[in-house]
Amino acid sequence: MKLQKGVMDWLDSRLGVREIMHANMGGYLLPRNINIWYTLGAVLLAMFGLQFLTGILLLIFYVPDTEKAFTSVTAIMNSIPYGWLIRYLHVVGSNLIIVLLLLHMLSVLFMGSYKRPRELTWLSGFIIFNLGLAFCLTGYLLPWSQLSFWATTVATDAAGAVPVVGDFLVEFLRGGPSVGAPTLGRFFALHVMGLPMLFLGLVGFHLFCVRRIGISSPPFGDGYRPLEPARSFHHDEHPGGVPFHPNYTIKDLSMVFFVLAALVAITFYAPWLFIPPDALEPADPFTTPAHIKPEWYFLWAYQTLKIFPSKLLGLASQGAAMGFLAVLPFLDRSPERRPAKRPVFVTLYLLGILLFVGLSIWGHYS
Amino acid sequence: MSASASPNERRKFLGILLGAIGAIIAGAFAWPLVRFLSPNNKGGAAQQVKIPKQKVAVGGAHFFSYQGRPAVLLEPEPGQYVALSAVCTHLGCIVKWVSDSQEFLCPCHGGRFSPAGQVLGGPPPKPLTTYAVKLDGETILVG
């Protein structure tokens, strides 16, 4: 205790750390009616940390070479002590992250927290979501299994629908006319270096926005009234609120542990949910497995491409849906955030979720 | 009923309890991590290495890997074999065989060893490790 105080005094006299800690912990007040959905950001941060850790560990044994990748992954699973655990945590974790990102976005949409002045927070979060999908796509190829190879072939082939430059785009993505060693090289570089650097920068900016603008009040209860956003910069204060630490950090931590428990449960009892049989065979560029399907979070896009008669139309509709979501705060400018007072938005919101789920199930069984 | 504990005592107890649970969970995760990062086996080599006689000439040296570490086999006299670790006892560089002077020279700091592994000069503090050698027909068994 004496040592801890000594270290704190030393740091405090030089950097004023006690002031920083107070401003961001005990003195950082959150709305009294803050709910469990606000913990998803902290849960996601913890999960990202785990992905970085397990990813670095996998890098020790993974060999990014078309001749050796599958064998190295097999060795991780079968020969390296606890290699299976590290890999399953990485695979299951990546899927859970997509679920959590979706839930985080859905809760922000439902509570209208994306609205002015939080447009940049939403936009950076939306880009982080897309980066998450890019992480999954690039990571999917690395084991160089039948599933990896053909899922990447189909995914990169979709870019061919872009008019004029489509063929060039496909070759550029693959580094050649078909998926091969150059594809593995560039996907590996992106997965372990390019995307993480971009990702860290964006997460930093996202957190900066959250802290700088202030936490939004949940739009529920009698006390809530929509406010006209200020014309100039204004930090959203919550006088009389609950301190971030320990009141909210406890909630954050309990949710983190709840999700970690779910991650461990799936890892131990149902890892096959995310590792189908085609993932257990090495890639064979001359044999396409029957009924090759993308991961669950790409099934909606896969089915959209099947529904539309032209691939270009299918791709354009996906682009339009994603583009609409990206710029939503710039289109939806009313200050009203209470779901009960936004019937049109809530109807579209529910229809959107139904469409996503419906298309995904259709894609799975088609 | 005994007197109930004060809030401070309760807090201390809960702190210790949480710390203990945290330590157990951390240990449960740390063990797989340590095992994952630990060497899979000792260099992946067998306890005994077989080398054909023709690999080494009289007055010459044959370098090979023994239990994951560089080793060297000499034939100072016809039919007489010596197996040594090729790792210099000074700072771990690999010694070179100088056939002209029939001695080992460490290229890092000039340590010199005899064909039997004894220190002849330079900074090495102790001789090179010697390995057991057995003859099995046309094969030499080291280890």
Image: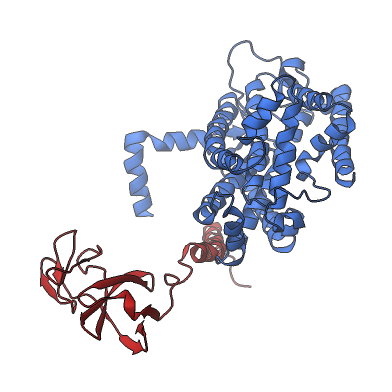
Q: Indicate the quadrant containing the N terminus of chain A: top left, top right, bottom left or bottom right.
A: bottom left
Of the pair A210 and A7, the residue shown nearer to us = A210
Chain assigned red: B
Q: Residue furthest left?
A: B121
Q: Residue furthest top?
A: A231
Chain assigned blue: A
Task: State whether residue A72 is above or below residue A19.
Answer: below
Asked which quadrant contains residue B89, the reply is bottom left
Residue A183 visible in this rendered orientation of the protein: yes
Identity of the residue drawn at 62% across and 27% down: A124
Task: State whether residue A338 is above or below residue B73.
Answer: above
What percent of the width, then of the height, locates residue A131?
A: 63, 34
Identity of the residue drawn at 45% across and 34% down: A20
Identity of the residue drawn at 52% across and 50% down: A56
Of the pair A65 and A335, the residue shown nearer to us = A65
Q: Indicate the quadrant containing the C terminus of chain A: top left, top right, bottom left or bottom right.
A: top right
What percent of the width, then of the height, locates residue B84?
A: 26, 76
What percent of the width, then of the height, locates residue A69?
A: 58, 53
Identity of the residue drawn at 38% across and 51% down: A4
Of the pair A220 and A309, the residue shown nearer to us = A309
Q: How does the figure colour the protein chain or chains?
A: by chain
Asked which quadrant contains residue B2, the reply is bottom right
What percent of the width, then of the height, locates residue B1?
A: 64, 73
Residue A104 visible in this rendered orientation of the protein: no
